[in-house]
């Protein structure tokens, strides 16, 4: 596996309009991308609606949760921070697949409260990728273009810029 990390600097998905139910439900985001990634790369299906909680810490204002979707050998790690004081603060999320030999993906985003939908309105923060080879990068591009209907633009990422949110 290469240690060369890239940041997706352009070609990112649109953030949904939180006022429209159809726009909110139809807008592709990280979940749809990772569903397609796992369907393309592994035989394992990753049910994002059945998380395994590994740790949950709560204080007066925040709840921090870490866990995974999938199985111990292949799936999607997640880390979330949610303000328990008010829903006007976006929930912070970091997702990273594991057990995928073709490369690494670290996507940090937030979810804004969208009325009765709860924390559902996606807002991009950072997306970093590392590929094992050109074939893996081509597969990432194909999945990205299928899901988001645009081409990602990569730029080199300094190692100190790589977040360790999931550690």
Image (tube, grey):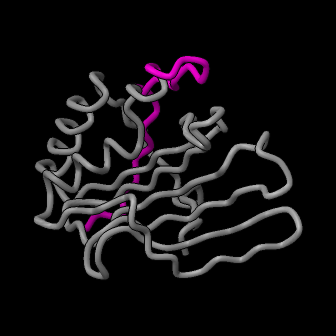
Q: Is residue 120 left or right of residue 34?
A: right
Figure quadrant of residue 118: top right
The picture places residue 45, in percent across and down from the top left corner, at: 20, 62
The picture places residue 144, in percent across and down from the top left corner, at: 27, 35
Taking depth in this image into account, of 101 and 5 the one nearest to the observer is 101
In the rendered view of the protein, which quadrant contains the N terminus? bottom left
Task: Determine if the magenta segment contains residue 73.
Answer: no
- Please identify the residue farthest to the front as the structure is shown: 116
For image coordinates 38% across by 26% down, the residue present is 26
In the rendered view of the protein, which quadrant contains the C terminus? bottom right
In this picture, which residue range is highlighted in magenta? 1-23
Q: Is residue 35 above or below residue 71?
A: above
The picture places residue 41, in percent across and down from the top left corner, at: 14, 57
Figure quadrant of residue 27: top left
Figure quadrant of residue 44: bottom left
For image coordinates 66% across by 33% down, the residue present is 115
Q: Main secondary structure of the magenta part?
A: loop
Task: Determine if the magenta segment contains residue 10.
Answer: yes
């Amino acid at each position: 596996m290469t240690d060369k990390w890239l940041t997706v600097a352009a070609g990112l998905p649109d953030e949904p309009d939180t006022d429209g139910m159809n726009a909110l439900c139809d807008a592709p985001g990280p979940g749809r991308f990772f569903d397609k990634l796992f369907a393309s790369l592994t035989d394992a299906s990753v049910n994002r609606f059945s998380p395994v909680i590994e740790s949950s810490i709560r204080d007066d204002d925040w709840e921090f949760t870490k866990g995974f979707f999938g199985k111990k050998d292949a799936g999607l790690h997640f880390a979330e921070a949610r303000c328990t004081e008010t829903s006007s603060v976006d929930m912070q999320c970091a997702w990273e697949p594991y057990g995928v030999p073709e490369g690494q993906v670290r996507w940090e985003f937030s979810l804004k409260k969208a009325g009765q939908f709860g924390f559902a309105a996606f807002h991009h923060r950072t997306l970093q990728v590392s590929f094992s080879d050109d074939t893996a990068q081509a597969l990432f591009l194909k999945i990205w273009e299928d899901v988001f209907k645009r081409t990602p633009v990569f730029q080199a990422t300094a190692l100190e810029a790589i977040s360790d949110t999931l550690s």
